């Protein structure tokens, strides 16, 4: 579920020793680029690799953006603190090639979230001066033009993703939210393979993790679902669809 920026046609290695160019081929930011264009991107002075220790902050709430980030290995959590000091888990980035921070970078708006390394993590940071972003006086490289084009595609996918989420959140009860989410991600056999953690799913549905777990258990008890780890199967499709 964190794969909005991922190239679905690419099979990416999670090995921390995998070449950066191989990981970049897994990112939608480089869709359509050949090897020479990927190397052109990596050779730019605006592209840097950074390693973060567990619990180290990548950027803070309120910082002004100056880059977008691609995960090379490890995992980061996107977080938000409330005024009372409670930490809210928003999302996780845990697959090599996943990208984050690009919306704030393009809009030039301060971050309203912060990002923390969940384990030892390496990121590829691409500075804003690499691509034009509206600077008519700059002559872009071909790789920069492709990055701009791919960013527009990423934004379109994220807009579609948010449209789906709004429909889920507009549901009345937690059970209706769960059913609409599962329906959007279900295959022809009525099965759903979750790609993110239960914590992420709870954040997506805007509920607490215990509430989500209780409702999934109740739906199993009612004979609607079979839940086995990250795999969910609809057992009674007719009753399931009554909640849509």
Image (cartoon, rainbow, N blue to C red):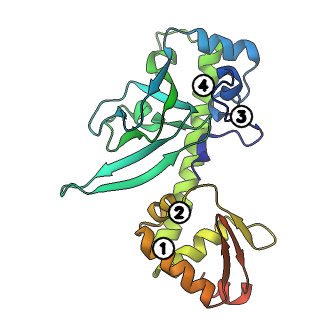
Give the mark nearest the N terminus, 1 or 4.
4
At 45% across and 36% down in the image, what residue appears?
Answer: 101
Give the mark nearest the N terminus, 3 or 2.
3
In this rendering, which labeled residue sits more in front, label 1 or label 4? Answer: 1
- Residues under numbered marks 3 and 4 in contact, where contact means CB atoms less than 8 Å apart: no
SS of the residue at dot 4?
helix
Residue, disc 4: 147
| Mark 2 to mark 1 CA distance (whole Å) | 8 Å
Q: How crowded is mark 4: few (under 14 residues within 10 Å), some or many (20 or more)?
A: many
| Mark 1 to mark 3 CA distance (whole Å) | 32 Å
Q: Is residue 228 above or below residue 161?
A: below
At 42% across and 36% down in the image, what residue appears?
Answer: 54
SS of the residue at dot 3?
loop
SS of the residue at dot 1?
helix
Residue, disc 2: 198
Image location (x, y in percent) of residue 20: 64, 21
- Residues under numbered marks 3 and 2 in contact, where contact means CB atoms less than 8 Å apart: no
SS of the residue at dot 2?
helix
- Residues under numbered marks 2 and 4 in contact, where contact means CB atoms less than 8 Å apart: no
Image location (x, y in percent) of residue 11: 76, 38
- Residues under numbered marks 2 and 1 in contact, where contact means CB atoms less than 8 Å apart: yes
- Residue 212 is labelled as 1
Q: Residue 133, can we see it?
A: no
Q: Residues within 10 Å of mark 3 (few under 14, many from 20)?
A: some
Q: In this view, does 16 lie above or below 79?
A: above
Residue, disc 3: 13
| Mark 3 to mark 2 CA distance (whole Å) | 24 Å
Give the mark nearest the N terminus, 2 or 1.
2
């Amino acid at each position: 579920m964190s794969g909005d920026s991922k190239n679905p046609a690419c099979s990416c290695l999670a090995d921390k020793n995998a070449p950066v160019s191989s990981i970049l081929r897994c990112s939608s930011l480089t869709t359509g680029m050949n090897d020479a264009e990927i190397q052109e991107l990596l050779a730019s002075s605006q592209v840097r690799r950074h390693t973060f220790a567990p619990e180290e902050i990548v950027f803070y709430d309120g910082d002004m953006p100056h880059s977008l980030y691609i995960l090379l290995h490890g995992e980061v959590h996107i977080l938000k603190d409330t005024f009372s000091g409670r930490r809210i888990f928003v999302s996780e980035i845990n697959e090599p090639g996943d990208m984050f921070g690009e919306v704030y970078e393009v809009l030039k708006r301060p971050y309203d979230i912060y990002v923390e390394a969940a384990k030892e993590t390496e990121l590829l940071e691409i500075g804003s001066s690499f691509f034009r972003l509206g600077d008519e006086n700059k002559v872009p490289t071909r790789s920069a033009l492709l990055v701009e084009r791919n960013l527009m595609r990423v934004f379109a996918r994220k807009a579609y993703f948010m449209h789906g989420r709004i429909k889920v959140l507009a549901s009345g009860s937690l059970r209706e939210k769960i059913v609409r989410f599962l329906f959007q991600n279900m295959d022809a056999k009525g099965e759903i393979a979750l790609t993110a953690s239960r914590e992420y799913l709870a954040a997506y549905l805007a509920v607490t993790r215990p509430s989500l777990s209780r409702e999934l258990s109740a739906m199993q008890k009612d004979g609607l679902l079979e839940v086995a780890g990250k795999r969910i199967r609809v057992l009674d499709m007719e009753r399931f669809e009554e909640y849509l």
